[in-house]
Each structure stands twice: as structure tokens, then as C-alpha cells.
Image (spheres, rainbow, N blue to C red):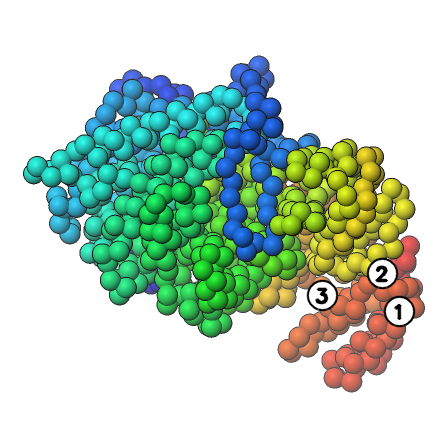
Amino acid sequence: MTGDKGVALTRRRLLGGGAALGGIAVATRVLNPGQAAPASAQPAGAAASAVAAGPRSAFHRAGATHPARTVRAAAKEVYPESWSLNPFPLSAVTLGQSVFTRAQQQALILNRAYSVDALLAVYRRNAGIDTKGARPPGGWEEYGPNPDAQRWGPAEYTRGQNTAGAGGLLRGHYGGHFLSGLSMAYASTGEAALADKVNAFVAGLEECRAALAAQTHNGAPRYSHPGFLSAYGEWQFSALEAFAPYGEIWAPYYTLHKIVAGLLDAHAYVGNEQALKLAEGIGHWVHSRLAKTTAEQRQKMWASYIAGECGGMNDVLVQLYWRSNDAKKQEFLDAANLFTYDAFVDACAAGEDTLNGRHANQYIPTFVGYIKLYNQTGEQRLIDGVRNMFDMVVPGRTYAHGGTGEGELWGPAGAVAGDIGPRNAESCAAYNMLKVARYLFMNEQDTKYMDYYERTVLNHILGGRRNRESTTGPENCYMFPVNPGTRKEYGNGNIGTCCGGTALESHVKYQDTIYLRAKDASALFVNLYIASTLTWEEMGLVLTQASSYPESDTSTLTIDQAPQGALTINVRVPAWVTGGAEIAINGVPTGTANTPGSYVPLTHDWKKGDTITVRVPLALRTEPTPDRADIQALVYGPTVLTAVDPSTKYLKVSLFARQGLDGSISRGVTQEPNNVFVIDGRVFEPAYNGKDVQYHMYFERSEPTVVFAGRSAGVANPKRTQGGSLLDEVWAKAPFADRNAFIEAVRSVSQSFVDSGLLSARDRQKVLLAAGRAPIDS
């Protein structure tokens, strides 16, 4: 969850072995979360974190459900007027069977099993009320070493007073994520028991807020505002205003963001009005604090390493402003503006790259908020800053699976291979970059945002969820590293950590971006090829997408209930496709021109039973890193493939001999079910499969000799001092229309190497002979 690489203070050093960092063992319980543990209970390590939900477990079954129409009627989702596209309610889209299904079902098991009392434990103890024998989840969501003293109000605390360290000082964040996850899970399934949990959770938080508001110190209210709600005292906020460092405090506004987000989600998806009232109270309290600070003071706060990490406070406060009917709701928008870190957003707006050394996930969530502030205020520097920040991260600081950062920090611009280390790609950063991409796309339909979204949600988010059922934890990795022979940081499933928290949401909302709708209801955007059913109630449209993508290349959209009047359905052609997609309506090719990285509009008076078939050709290809052309990833369509191998050195892989006229890697390649490929006996598996094994996301490309379709020229592959090799330049011209086009490419490239003195005329003849004899078109 920060600033300069030179800062020696780290979570690991401050928290030691008693808390989870990136899957490090955490003191947690073996018992079901809602049960009190006997005094002799031992902490549960990674092996005990996944409590089996057996084949006949009640947690596998949905139980009583509310009809989807009832769920949608209760929802209170709001969108800004300025968005040209709007999402559908989660309840309007249901997932079919796909590669995403296992993660969604595993997440639902946890939601059904987990105890609300366990989630409320840290709040109740802080408020001084009965915890009902429940123990907190563990990890960072723990009481910490000094919870009773840490109820201090601002008047009770002086700088340096907390000497117990940061342990436990993020408590409450995980509960906020869980409240969001439960709310989303209800919207996705309609399960009545999940709605009951949301309502019980919110009622428990109101009980805690009221208890905090009733506390006094020296005859005066202990806390500065009756809306205050946290799982520790208000002192962390006043200490931040006095520039307390991480270690004395943790990140109080980061935690608060998760609480407010959970409350807003409970209101949005379950229709809980009490949740909105609680969020409004927090919003007024935040304004009352920050309005008294100076601009200079706030800038120093938001620049502070971890302590000033504020999550998406600006995001939720703008949402609160949109959602609220409170007479003083302007305070929410004013407070959102007070979280702007001017130095950073202004640099991004000006195109000045200052990301190097910054903590990625300390700042990415604020850019989600800047988009919404722009939507409300029209302040141009904010949207300019967000666009430019995205471009500074993607692709120049983005790994093959969509992750970013090493050791949670951004590296230099354009450094991907050069920034590969043992702890790449924090899951939270990917979670928040997806939000940035999604909201940018809603503002302006640049397909690069959806290309990033597809890559990251499939490989990083889905792949980060361990393929294991658990009733106690999210089973998500903290880091999804990319160094040779690495493993994902699963530990105990990241109970209580930031990445465990975001996972509570990610795996119950896969459907939220499959489809988007034009604000004026004139068009539907099909963004992701995931088996699903869309019910667009206002238009009378019911559409089913049948697809096993990305394990097959064809998706079929069927109109089960026709819309009223003509509708444009825009289908996406990913940027990585070679030559475009094949699109047909009722089996007849549309003949519509389409190019990679575009949407194809299909305007039609749709009838029940009409079909749209989209074939997106899948092929193996490599993707080099921007700073080292020889460090590459193997990709199949949108799927990143990882080599299963325990070696901790880069694997050396040769592939040019396997390429066909279309440039794809196919010769001597065995494709097995579930997107598993075998090349020279080496197994490549999809990054999304959730396995916990040693793997290589990148390999070192090694092409020592000139070979075409298995035919060797017996000549070393010459390489330019600045640039690629002969084979690099030949295959850069692919795809080839036919064999003659291939031979002409070999002829022209080899001649240029002769002209440069890098290839002898005799060896060129050997190269041409090998190309002529190669079975390249077979």
C-alpha cells in the first residue's frame, strides 16, 4: 500500500512476522470466523487457511433468492450526466459457464459462510460494545497490540504517543471491502441471505457509530463529530495532520475509503438507506476536519509515505454527492476536492512523468476519483492527468498480465524487463487500474482502454484467485510476480490484507463490464466475450452470449427477446487480432470492414432468434518487453501463457522455426484442453488458471541460427549493433500473403544484411536456399 525507493521504512520492517505482507504467514484462526476460539487455539498457517467446503456443503447452494426484477428495483445506482456510456446494474447480467465461473463460485462460498460478527469485531471492540464472542479475521484486520488505548480522541493524543507500531492500525479496511463484496454478491445472485448479511452489517456499524458519538473526554464529546466511524480512535487523523509518519500511524483515510465504499455499495446494490445515512455522516465529519487544514498542509499529507495514502476518498465523496439528498451535500464535493494532490496530478496533466519511485497503489485510486471530479466539475487538468497517467503506465510500466510495479513501487518509464524483480505486480494496483480504464472508456470510447481491461481482468485478476475453495479467506495473491521460476504470493490466502480485500469484490463482479449501454439507449457495446445473459429491461432486450472464449475463438449472441425499435450493437475487435474478426448476422457475413482495435457497429431491427456470430481468430504470438526485445512473453489471443518450470534463470526459447506464413507459432506445437500448450516438451499454462506452482511469465528469446519451418540454413543469425536480427526483420513483415511474399521478404532483408557487412554473399545464398526449401506453407 508509497514514495521514494530510498525510504528504509517498510511494512515488513514495521509489522514484523505478526501480520500479513504479501502472503506472509498471519496469525489467524482455524475455527469458522464467527466462532470464538478457545484460549489454547493456535494460529492457522497457510495450510489451514482453506477450510474445505465439501461436496454437500450448504455453502455451495444459493438458498432462497429474490427475483432479478426485485433486486434491480431495490438498487440505487447513479451515474454522472457527462458519461456517454453507462454500465448495466450487476443484476442485469448473469454469468454463464466460462473460465471465470470457478472464481465467482469460490467467492460465493466465502460470502455465504463468513460471519458478520467476525467482521464487526474490530469496530465493536473499539466502540466498547459486546463483540459477541467473535474474533476478527486476522492479518491486518486484527486488534493489534494496543487496541483499547488506541481509542484516543484528538484531544487525548500528542505526536509520538503511539509507541506500539503500526500493527492493527488498518483495522476496518477489510470489513469495508467485505461489505462491498457482500453487496455485489447479492446483486449478482439475488440470494436473500446475502442481503440479510449486508443489512445486519450496516446495523452493526450504526450501533458502533452511536456508541462512539456517546463517548466523552473531560466532559466533552471524545470525537469531533457524531458522524465519525472507524475501528480505532480519531487520533490517527489528527496525527496525520501533524505529519505523523507511517509506523506511528498507518493510512487512516485509506481505511476510511473502504468503509465509505462499502456503505455506498450497500445502498447501491441492496437499497439500504441506513448505509447512506452513515456515509453522509462520515462525509460531513471528513469535511469538518479537512476544511480546517491549509492547502500546504494537505499537500504534505498526501505526499507522505503510506501515512498519507487515502485510497479513493475523492471517488467515494463524489459518489456520495451524486447519491445524497442531504441539505449540506455540497460539503461532500468540497471535501473530495481537498484530497487532490496538486503536484502529482499537475505533472501528469502536463505530460511530465514523475512516477518513478512512487508507490503505485497509493496514487492509482485517486485517479479514479479525479475522473469523477472532472465529470462533476469539468476541470480539464484532472482528465488530462488521468489520461496521461494511464499512458505512462500502459504499456511502458505494464507486465504481460496487466500488472505494474516492483515491490509496490513504479520504476523508470519504459522499464519492464529492467524492473522485473521478486515482488512484481501488486494485485490492488491491477484492481484500481481496471477502474481507471473502465471509467476512461465510459468518458471516451478509446479501444485501448478495453484492450487493457480484457488482458488484466483475465490474466491478473482471475489468475490471482487461487483455484481452491475456502470458507475463511479470499485465496487471492498479494503479488503476482513475473521473475523466472517465481510463485504467486498466496500465503494463507491473504486474509485481512489489502489485496485480500480487493479480491472480495473482484470475483463477484466479473459481469460489470461485459456490456455497456449508450446514455441515450441507442447502442449496446459488447466489450468482453464471456458467456452471459443480459436483460436490458428498459429496452425490452434479452441477449444471451454463448462462448467458451478464450479457449475457442467464436462467440454467438442470440436475441432471446427483441428490443423495441432499431438498436446498434457494437462488437469489439481486439487490437491483437491479425487481420480482423469474422462477423455474421444470422449466419450471413456482414461484409463490414473491421480493423484490430475497433468496434464494429451493427444497426438492425432485431427480431427474436436473431444471432450475431463473432469469430476472433486466436493464435500463438510473442510479446517483447519495450526495453529488451529478447525478453518475451508467449500469448494466445488475450491469454498470457506461463511456462511451468522450477528454474530461477530465464528459460532460453527458440520459436522462429515454428512460425507459418501468417506469423503465428504453430509448427510442432501441441495444444491441449484448457489452453495448455506443449513446445519441445515444455508445458505452457494459462496465467488465469489459478494454480500455485513455479512458473515463468517471461523467457529469453534465443535464435542462434537461421531456420525456416524447421529447415536450417547452417548460418548464424546475424544481428545489428542497434536493432534486431535477420530473423527478427524477416518476421516483422508477417503475415505474408503467400510463399512468394515470404521469399521476397527473406531476399530483401538478407541483402540489407550483406550491404551492412553483417552477412557474406555465400551465407546469403544458404539463407535463400533454406527459405526456398522450407515447407512454410504446409
User: Where residue 238 sits in the image (x, y, percent)?
Assistant: 21, 50
What element does badge 1 sit on? helix
Contact between marks 2 and 1 (CB within 8 A): the answer is yes
Mark 1 residue type: Ala
Mark 3 residue type: Pro
Indicate which disc residue 661 carries.
2
Question: Which callout, 2 or 3, points at the residue further toward the start of the chain?
Answer: 2
Q: Distance between the residues labelled 2 and 3?
A: 21 Å
- Crowd around label 3: few <14 · some 14–19 · many ≥20 (10 Å): some
For image coordinates 28% across by 64% down, the residue present is 295
User: Where residue 161 sits in the image (x, y, percent)?
Assistant: 14, 47
Q: Distance between the residues labelled 2 and 1?
A: 9 Å
Contact between marks 2 and 3 (CB within 8 A): the answer is no
The one nearer the camera, 500 or 66, is 66
Residue bearing mark 1: 741
Q: How many labels does the image show?
A: 3
Q: Visible in this render: residue 10? A: no
User: Where residue 255 sits in the image (x, y, percent)?
Assistant: 34, 43
User: Where residue 160 sits in the image (x, y, percent)?
Assistant: 15, 50
What element does badge 2 sit on? loop
Q: Visible in this render: residue 92? A: yes
Mark 2 residue type: Leu
For image coordinates 49% across by 50% down, the residue present is 432
Residue bearing mark 3: 704
The one nearer the camera, 45 or 230, is 230
For image coordinates 16% across by 36% down, the residue present is 149
Question: Which callout, 2 or 1, points at the residue further toward the start of the chain?
Answer: 2
Q: Quadrant of residue 624?
A: bottom right
The answer to whether residue 290 is above or below residue 542 is below
What element does badge 3 sit on? loop
Question: Which callout, 3 or 1, points at the residue further toward the start of the chain?
Answer: 3
